[in-house]
Image (cartoon, rainbow, N blue to C red):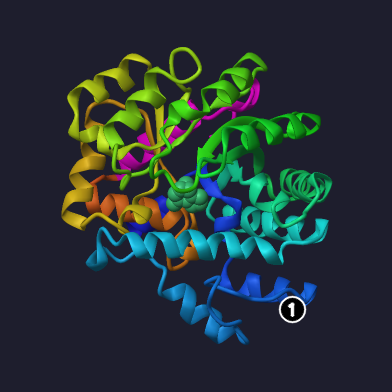
């Protein structure tokens, strides 16, 4: 327990959390009631009528390494995740969602965070950009002033939608570029290699944005996708990689990541969806021991038994045998690879 106190109290930087992935059953229920929207958790299923039903449905989606490699479960996660977007209607909803994260973050001593959001999921529900971004901005300003938590946004494109849709959304986001530090790519990776989105990522780099992409642990072409993200997209590859843990299986990829000095955002709890404990620890450990700047993060806490950055750090301690010195290195890595202004960056931790 003394060690847990160290992990709780150490100042933190979080670089991989999906705002829509913190929509817990309770919050989703509250917003559904407030807006009178329908509550669904599987598109062809029946409407849910209570918080208890919602909690039970979401409980079935949590990572569970006894059900590894279950494509059906992965599909259901995405379905439930995007259906969650339907209860977010007003500026206040987006404010509440972001504040929910930022308040939890303050309690765990997170000092700075870069938050993913998926604008295509919201425009798809008919939500205007001003509603999302104004709500986010108010939360960002309040958290900085009252909670001592600084934040910035990473706009992710949905890789299962077209590159044209990504480009349209990129252009529509430019009026809000002062809030957005980076561009990412997420959603279902099946048959959607990084290079498909080369044009919009190249443009974003020319415009001064930092670049990252998900390379999910269960992607079928995992090594090729990591290679493209690390060395091909936008001329010479991205600025960070999200997940990418299968690089641990391939010395060339490790060398490439080291040569480009790419940071990686690792979310241990997520991988229990498709990896066993005994496989996971050595993979994370191999990246760390190779000297790659990995950071530990939370991904989608609402879909993971309420596991946040703190629980992910504790899990990585357990899985990899990290001690407090290692935990300090991981926190320092996150501060090193974050995209805050240099002046801010120096004083984050
Ligand atoms: N993988 C890919 N995209 C995502 C995820 C994930 O786990 N969560 C939210 N978007
Ligand atoms: Zn993610």
Can see residue 107?
Answer: no
**Left or right position of 128 against 108:** right
- Element marked by disc 1: helix
For this rendering, which residue is in front, 259 or 88? 88
Going 54% across and 74% down the picture, which residue do you hit? 44
- Seen from the viewer's position, the closer of residues 98 and 130 is 130
Q: Is residue 328 left or right of residue 172?
A: left
Q: Looking at the magenta stretch, what is its main secondary structure?
A: helix
The residue at label 1 has a CB less than 8 Å from ligand 1: no
* Near-viewer residue (269 or 42): 42
Residue 268, percent across and down? 34, 50
Report if residue 342 lies within the magenta region.
Answer: yes
Residue 267 sits inside the magenta stretch: no
Locate residue 323: give its quadrant.
top left
- In the rendered image, the quadrant that contains the N terminus is bottom left
> Which residue corresponds to the image point at 77% horizontal and 54% vertical from the top-left?
127
Q: Is residue 309 above or below residue 185?
A: below
| Residue 29 in view (yes/no) | yes
Residue 296 lies, in percent from the top left, at 40, 43
Q: Which quadrant holds residue 217?
A: top left
Q: Residue 79's spot in the image, x, y percent?
A: 51, 62
Q: Position of residue 204 (x, y in %)?
A: 63, 22
Residue matched to label 1: 33
What residue span does the magenta drawing correspond to? 324-349
**Residue 240 position (above or below residue 277):** above
Q: Residue at x 76, y 29 (%)?
A: 174
Please tell me whether residue 186 is drawn above or below residue 277 in the rendered image: above
């Amino acid at each position: 327990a003394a060690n847990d106190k160290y992990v709780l109290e150490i100042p933190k930087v979080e670089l991989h959390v999906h705002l829509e992935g913190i929509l817990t059953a309770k919050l989703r229920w509250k917003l559904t009631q407030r807006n009178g929207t329908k509550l669904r958790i599987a598109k062809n299923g029946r409407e849910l009528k209570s918080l208890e039903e919602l909690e039970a449905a979401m409980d079935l989606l949590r990572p569970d390494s006894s059900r590894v490699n279950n494509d059906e479960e992965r599909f259901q996660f995405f379905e439930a995740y995007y259906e969650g977007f339907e209860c977010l209607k007003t500026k206040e909803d987006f404010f509440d969602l972001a504040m929910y994260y930022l308040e939890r973050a303050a309690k765990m001593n997170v000092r700075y965070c870069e938050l993913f959001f998926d604008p295509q999921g919201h425009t798809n529900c008919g939500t205007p950009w001003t509603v999302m971004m104004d709500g986010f901005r108010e939360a960002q300003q309040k958290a900085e002033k009252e909670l001592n938590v600084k934040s910035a946004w990473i706009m992710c494109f949905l890789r299962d939608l077209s590159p044209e849709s990504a480009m349209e959304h990129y252009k529509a986001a430019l009026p809000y570029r002062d809030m957005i530090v980076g561009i990412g790519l997420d959603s279902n990776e099946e048959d959607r290699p990084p290079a498909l989105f080369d044009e919009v990522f190249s443009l974003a780099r020319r415009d001064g944005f930092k670049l990252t992409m998900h390379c999910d642990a269960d992607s079928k072409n995992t090594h090729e996708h990591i290679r493209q993200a690390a060395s091909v997209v936008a001329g010479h590859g991205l600025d960070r990689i999200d997940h990418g843990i299968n690089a641990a299986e391939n010395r060339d990829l490790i060398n490439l990541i080291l040569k480009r000095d790419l940071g990686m955002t690792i979310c241990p709890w997520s991988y229990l969806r498709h990896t066993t404990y005994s496989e996971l620890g050595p993979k994370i450990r191999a990246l760390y021991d190779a000297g790659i700047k990995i950071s530990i993060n939370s991904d989608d806490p609402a879909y993971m038994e309420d596991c946040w950055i703190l629980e992910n750090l504790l899990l990585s301690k357990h899985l990899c045998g990290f001690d407090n010195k290692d935990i300090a290195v991981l926190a320092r890595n996150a501060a090193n690879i974050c995209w805050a202004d240099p002046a801010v960056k120096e004083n984050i931790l």
